[in-house]
Image: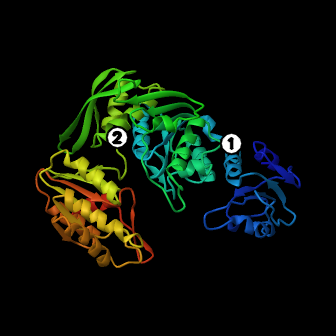
Amino acid sequence: MLLADLIRDLDFTCSGRTDLEITDVVYDSRQVKRGSLFICLCGSAVDSHQFAGTAAKAGAAAIVAQRPVEAGGASVVMVPDTRLAMALISAAWFGYPAREMTVVGITGTKGKTTVSYMVRSILETAGIKTGVIGTIGAVIGDRVIKTDNTTPESYEIQSYLRWMADEGCKAVVMEASSIGLRGHRLSGIRFDYGVFTNFSPDHIGGNEHKDLAEYMACKRLLFRMCKIGVINVDDENWSGIVEGHTCALETFGFSPKAELIAEKEELVSRKGFLGVRFNLSGRLNFSGVEVGIPGRFSVYNALAAVAVCLHFPVTEQNIRDGLENVKVCGRVEPVKVPGNYTLLIDYAHNALAMRNILETLREYHPKRLVCMFGAGGNRARSRRFEMGEESGRLADLSVLTADNSRDEDVMDIIADIRTGIDKTGGKYVVIPDRKQAIKYCMENAQDGDVIVLAGKGHEDYQEIKGVKYHLDEREVVADILNGKL
């Protein structure tokens, strides 16, 4: 592809030729080959403008930069923002794949992953092949490409979109994180639908957001990039989120002023199923909708998904089946076991998430609520104290084990967790080996128990002393049931 075709959407000046044939687009100078277009990015740790000369010597035909660089004989494309430029160049490089599918973007503090999987579940029940890009990875069917971020870099996003379009996906659902929106990772994509789930303080400080106002401003960007915004009107921050929007708006919630309304929600508990049931009114009117994910917040997530899917050719039965059978990897995920108890896998790995999941499960009145968890090494010790205190207060039994201990000794981490639990007087046992801790939970389960394996969620590894070891808790459960462990 010619350089001129790749940069036609940019605001740029160029020193050198633009009729060059580009063989690849890269933003890591170590991947430069002859004929590459190298894009200089300013990261939190490294500014790759310093590698422009190295890239030119390695054969880069052209370099995109936002400040002057030494580039040898390579053409230099100067732009105001190289991250925005990379997004637009990547879209062109992969042939604008988003234009071949209906694209849904989801933003909010919580619920992005769950809503994305609910949308996919409903659409695929209706026969509409749907891809997902988010925390769990880039997903088509059972195939998963793991991603490093909730919203990957723009080049990776466009490559995944190309893959999905080529595989016959008619729709794609993407998590739009505030960091991803701020960093132009989603620029160059015209979303058909943008969804707002909720807003609460998070991601403040460090390399994330300087304050709550910036956090909201970044969330707000999605509603200047989509055709229709689907908004949780019950969230007190919704008007701030849509300030300056350029899209049409649709609303959902329990409020009678919403266009899609949930009513008469109730918790549902039966063997192997913890969920919620509610009625729909407004834009849809039918009763007894069941969601196979526990917690009243699941109603909001379901409303968001239904509001989006109303724009697709789906039936009432598609909606019912999609929501009842939805499964989100590592998000209050049920694992089938033969006993009369419930076993769940969840990603809760801090105090707030621990409190949310345990309070949610408490509402189902289990005989015992058992929480197995550890805490990450090389992280703030305060997190361990707080997690221990929450589990000690809300669980009937805590099973303390390893998580990603990284460079720390697991027993030191557990000692910190015990400090928090001891403040509550809660019961606990210590089993440092995570596989053996899972086995203990299953072998000592009582009828009516709810057991949550917290902390790993969708992760399939355990990091110890700089080495990642394979550990998928679903496989561990299967090995225990098959007598292999």
The residue shown at (70%, 65%) is 48
The residue tagged 2 is 326
424 left or right, relative to 161:
left
301 left or right, relative to 430:
right
43 left or right, relative to 193:
right
Q: Position of residue 266 (x, y in %)?
A: 22, 34
Neighbour tally class for label 1: few under 14, some 14-19, many 20 plus, Cα within 10 Å: some
Residues 354 and 95: in front is 354
In the rendered image, the vertical position of residue 480 relative to residue 309, given as above or below? below
The residue shown at (46%, 31%) is 308
User: How many numbered badges does the structure rendering display?
Assistant: 2
Give amino acid for label 1: Gly
Neighbour tally class for label 2: few under 14, some 14-19, many 20 plus, Cα within 10 Å: some
Q: Secondary structure at mark 1?
A: loop
Q: Quadrant of residue 403?
A: bottom left
The residue tagged 1 is 95
Q: Secondary structure at mark 2?
A: loop
- Residue 237 visible within the image: yes
